[in-house]
Amino acid sequence: MRARVAVDLDLHVEAAADVVLSIAPPTSWIEDERLDVGADRRSLAPRVHLDAHGGRLHRLALRPGTTRVRYHAEISAPRVPGPLDELDPVRYLRPSRYAPSDALSEAAARFADASARDAVRRVADWVHENLDYVPGSSEPTDSAIDTIRKRGGVCRDYAHVTIALLRASGVPARLVSAYAPGLDPMDFHAVTEAFVEGRWEVVDATRLAPRPHLVRIATGRDAADTAFLTTLSGAVEIDQMMVTAVASGALERDDHISRVLLP
């Protein structure tokens, strides 16, 4: 799978800030890329950090004013999946900030008698059928519990509910932020990976984009680990953002039943 991805991001910095960007896929996906960050006619050089799953974080110290971020990359999916960490099935069974699975044991009881394979299918179906996709309906601090109460949200909310219910059903699950060719309206996308039969399989309860064309950006417990912009200190607002993800060639159809692995 090949694709072109890009992010044009303008930030209004109200007070000197320390921020982290998570917009670049792991280097194993990259054929060619360019990241330009500028403010007040100055180019800024971020510090690059790697997370546990090969994700790349770009950390920047920003002064008050406007900062422009321009990222463009040519992508080719790795042929070999990333290595499995033997602790991941333990790590991703634990409750987390946005996926408090320990508080959803009653809600997950309906899936308790299912095998891991059946639980993945049944949880994804339940989330898809019981939530409404409503842009702007959720708050950045909403957890899976809040989303279930509201009966709606956006892709990260769908992923958090899916993750929490799977963990409460005994299936390790984690969140992947991704570029998603075919997504409409175009934006960053969030999906779930469930650990079934010794491998991580992609689950997307929104069913808004074909899973075979997803481009991994970051992987973690929930949105706390995978947000495209994290403000560690200071005050920053997004003035403008445009995300682009275009597949090379025709998009594959996705029945959202077949097993899909994301390298």
Image (cartoon, rainbow, N blue to C red):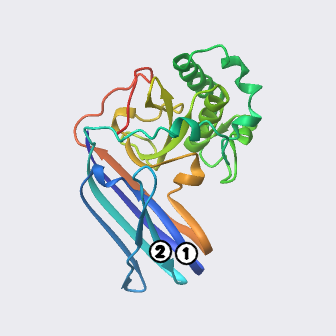
Front residue of 27 and 88: 88
Mark 1: few/some/many CA within 10 Å (<14, 14-19, 20+): some
Q: Quadrant of the C terminus?
A: top left
Q: Residue at x 28, y 42 (%)?
A: 77
What is the number of the mark on residue 161?
A: none
Mark 2, secondary structure of its residue: strand
Query: Looking at the image, is 41 positioned above or below residue 108?
Result: below
* Residue that lies at the very extreme toward the top in this rendered image: 113
Q: Is residue 16 left or right of residue 33?
A: right
Badge 1 is on which residue? 18
Q: Residue at x 61, y 24 (%)?
A: 129
Query: Looking at the image, is 51 positioned above or below residue 46?
Result: above
Front residue of 2 and 28: 28
Picture quadrant of residue 182: top left
Badge 2 is on which residue? 60
Q: What's the CA distance linking mark 2 and mark 1?
A: 6 Å
Picture quadrant of residue 152: top right
Percent of width and height locating residue 134: 61, 41
Mark 2: few/some/many CA within 10 Å (<14, 14-19, 20+): some
Q: Give the residue type at disc 1.
A: Asp
Picture quadrant of residue 107: top right
Q: Is residue 32 left or right of residue 11?
A: left
Q: Quadrant of the N terminus?
A: top left
Query: Looking at the image, is 175 positioned above or below residue 72?
Result: above
Mark 1, secondary structure of its residue: strand
Percent of width and height locating residue 125: 57, 22
Front residue of 236 and 77: 77
Percent of width and height locating residue 3: 27, 46
